[in-house]
Image: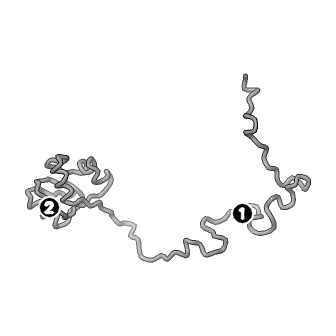
């Protein structure tokens, strides 16, 4: 066997449908495109979302309100969650972004805000992006410190 006598497996290939090659081919005339209309013309391409003249979904659905492109989305971590990790021995005395990522409370590029739900008994030094006033008070009341990144 050489490169000169390779050929595809039997039945795996078919010759193309040759259109617009005269009436005798059976595919002349309108060349399988039917009569008139945009779809019969060369260069036709339908707009994305076009629904045949029916009002497209994109225009039917009501739109209202305002989306602030500068919005910052914070991931909330509650005090009771931190206390749970202390009780399980997953964190000791310092809580940084690395520790939160390790314990799957946030992802590495997230902005984190500590929220005040639950109570904190452990003395923790927490370094994250934001704290609620109640969370900060609870952390300092337990003898820890809240450091903003």
Q: Is residue 61 above or below residue 25?
A: below
| Viewer-side residue, 79 vs 37 | 79
* Quarter that holds the C terminus: bottom left
Residue 54 rendering spot, x and y as whole percentages:
63, 75
- Residue 121, image quadrant: bottom left
Look at the numbered disc 1 and give the secondary structure of its residue.
loop
Side of 11 relative to 28 (left or right) = left
Side of 30 relative to 136 (left or right) = right
**Outermost residue, top direction?**
1
Residue 22 rendering spot, x and y as whole percentages:
89, 54
Disc 1 versus disc 2: distance between alpha carbons?
66 Å
- Residue 129, image quadrant: bottom left
Q: Give the mark, 1 or 2, whose residue is nearer the N terminus.
A: 1
Residue at label 2?
Answer: 119
Residue at label 1?
Answer: 44
Label 1, residues with CA under 10 Å away: few <14, some 14-19, many ≥20 = few
Q: What residue is rendered at 66% in x and 74% in y?
A: 53
For the residues carrying marks 1 and 2, which lies nearer the camera in this image?
2
Residue 90 rendering spot, x and y as whole percentages:
20, 47
Numbered tag placed on residue 74 in the rendering: none
Side of 69 relative to 139 (left or right) = right
* Quarter that holds the N terminus: top right
**Outermost residue, right direction?**
24
Look at the numbered disc 2 and give the secondary structure of its residue.
loop
């Amino acid at each position: 066997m050489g490169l000169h006598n390779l050929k595809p497996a039997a039945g795996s290939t078919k010759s193309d449908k040759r259109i617009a090659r005269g009436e005798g081919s059976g595919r002349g005339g309108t060349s399988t495109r039917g009569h008139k209309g945009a779809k019969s013309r060369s260069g036709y391409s339908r707009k994305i979302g076009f629904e045949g003249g029916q009002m497209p979904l994109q225009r039917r659905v009501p739109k209202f309100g305002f989306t602030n492109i500068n919005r910052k989305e914070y991931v909330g971590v509650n005090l009771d969650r931190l206390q749970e990790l202390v009780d399980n021995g997953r964190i000791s005395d310092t809580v940084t972004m690395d520790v939160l990522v390790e314990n799957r409370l946030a992802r590495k590029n997230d902005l984190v805000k500590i929220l005040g739900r639950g109570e904190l008994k452990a003395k923790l030094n927490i370094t994250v992006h934001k704290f609620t006033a109640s969370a900060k008070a609870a952390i300092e009341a337990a003898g820890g410190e809240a450091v903003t990144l």
